[in-house]
């Protein structure tokens, strides 16, 4: 067995992902497809000011699959520099070729990422044994810890519960983000990994409170780009035992979440950011931005949501 990679550049040597709220940060782009650096800086500052635990760049909302390697690296460096150590930064690393995933982990480490969020290979759906080998091989040589990423809508494979249980014992595999939206699966993973130094968070905006009640430790989610005070407050109220207040916040949030889901998911969240003044925040080619008519529906959902203070918490 090869020796485990060592943490670099003073990065955190986590044994488990810290609990809390992590925005799955959008990648602001110009109409020409260039990185809108000033907008990214402002968005980074905003979510930190909103009280998030950390930032996750280059996930599904960050369009990891449609950005060039150079663009991905630029996002990592820019957010890390802007964060200035105020919060940790994770990065998505996704590819169908294991050598390119390894290279992506090396780049993420060089750019100061504290951990990597890694989905399984896609296109050819791997078997559970192949998934287990993929992550174990990566973890043995990775310079930064790994967070498993279960997102069947995009990868077409659900990480088997038994595989997650076994991988959770690896000292460099520190957590799981579950974006499958299947609550029974989340419960099974939580039960299978209980007692291990391993953190399970939800990636489903609509399931935060339910996931916390089941034992999850927080969320890495798209909504925290735009309305992180809601996720932060739901977690705070739950931890304080104020379940009615947490339910009220979750229910208020649902209309905006459902509207964004209806109008394109990550595209809709980028449109919401533009409506909030974080412009330009266009989507990467060949995909198209949300229409003006759909933006009107998003604007109305934002208006109805209001603020955490409006909810009386």
Image: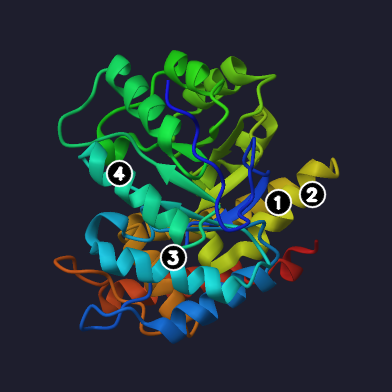
Tell me: 155 left or right of 217.
Answer: left
Tell me: 80 left or right of 30.
Answer: right
Q: Residue at x 30, y 69 (%)?
A: 71
Q: Position of residue 78 (x, y in %)?
A: 46, 74
Q: Could you tell me how far apart the alpha carbons at marks 3 and 1 are, in whole angstroms?
A: 28 Å
Mark 1 burial class by Cα count in 10 Å: few <14, some 14-19, many 20+? many
Mark 4 burial class by Cα count in 10 Å: few <14, some 14-19, many 20+? some
> Mark 2 highlights which residue?
237
Q: Is tag 1's residue or tag 4's residue first in the polypeptide sequence?
A: 4
> Mark 3 highlights which residue?
76
Q: Could you tell me how far apart the alpha carbons at marks 1 and 2 are, in whole angstroms?
A: 5 Å
* Secondary structure under the numbered disc 1 in the rendered image: helix
* Secondary structure under the numbered disc 3 in the rendered image: helix
> Mark 4 highlights which residue?
101
Query: Which quarter of the picture shows residue 34?
Result: bottom left
Residue 234 is tagged as 1
């Amino acid at each position: 067995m090869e020796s485990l990679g060592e943490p670099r550049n003073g990065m955190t040597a986590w044994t488990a992902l810290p609990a809390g709220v992590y925005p799955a940060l959008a990648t602001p782009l110009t109409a020409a497809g260039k990185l809108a650096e000033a907008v990214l800086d402002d968005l980074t500052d905003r979510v930190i000011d909103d009280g998030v635990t950390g930032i996750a760049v280059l996930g599904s909302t960050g369009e990891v699959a449609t950005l060039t390697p150079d663009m991905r690296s630029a996002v990592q460096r820019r957010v890390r520099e802007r964060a200035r150590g105020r919060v940790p930064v994770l990065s998505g690393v996704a590819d169908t070729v294991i050598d390119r995933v390894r290279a992506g982990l090396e780049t993420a480490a060089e750019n100061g990422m504290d951990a990597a969020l890694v989905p399984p290979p896609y296109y050819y759906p791997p078997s559970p044994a192949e998934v287990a080998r993929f992550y174990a091989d990566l973890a043995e040589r990775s310079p930064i810890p790994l967070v498993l990423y279960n997102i069947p809508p995009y990868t077409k494979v659900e990480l088997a519960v038994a595989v997650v249980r076994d991988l959770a014992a690896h000292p460099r595999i520190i957590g799981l983000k579950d974006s499958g939206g299947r609550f029974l699966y989340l419960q099974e993973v939580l039960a299978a990994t209980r007692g291990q130094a391993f953190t399970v968070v939800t990636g489903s905006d609509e399931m935060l409170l339910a996931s916390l009640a089941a034992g999850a430790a927080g969320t890495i989610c798209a909504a925290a780009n735009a309305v992180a005070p809601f996720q932060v407050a739901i977690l705070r109220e739950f931890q304080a035992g104020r379940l009615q207040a947490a339910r009220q916040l979750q229910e208020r949030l649902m209309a905006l979440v459902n509207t964004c889901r209806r109008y394109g998911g990550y595209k809709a969240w980028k449109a919401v950011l533009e409506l909030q003044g974080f412009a330009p925040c266009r989507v990467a080619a060949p995909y198209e931005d949300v229409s003006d008519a759909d933006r009107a529906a998003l604007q109305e959902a934002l208006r109805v949501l209001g603020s955490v203070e409006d909810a009386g918490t």
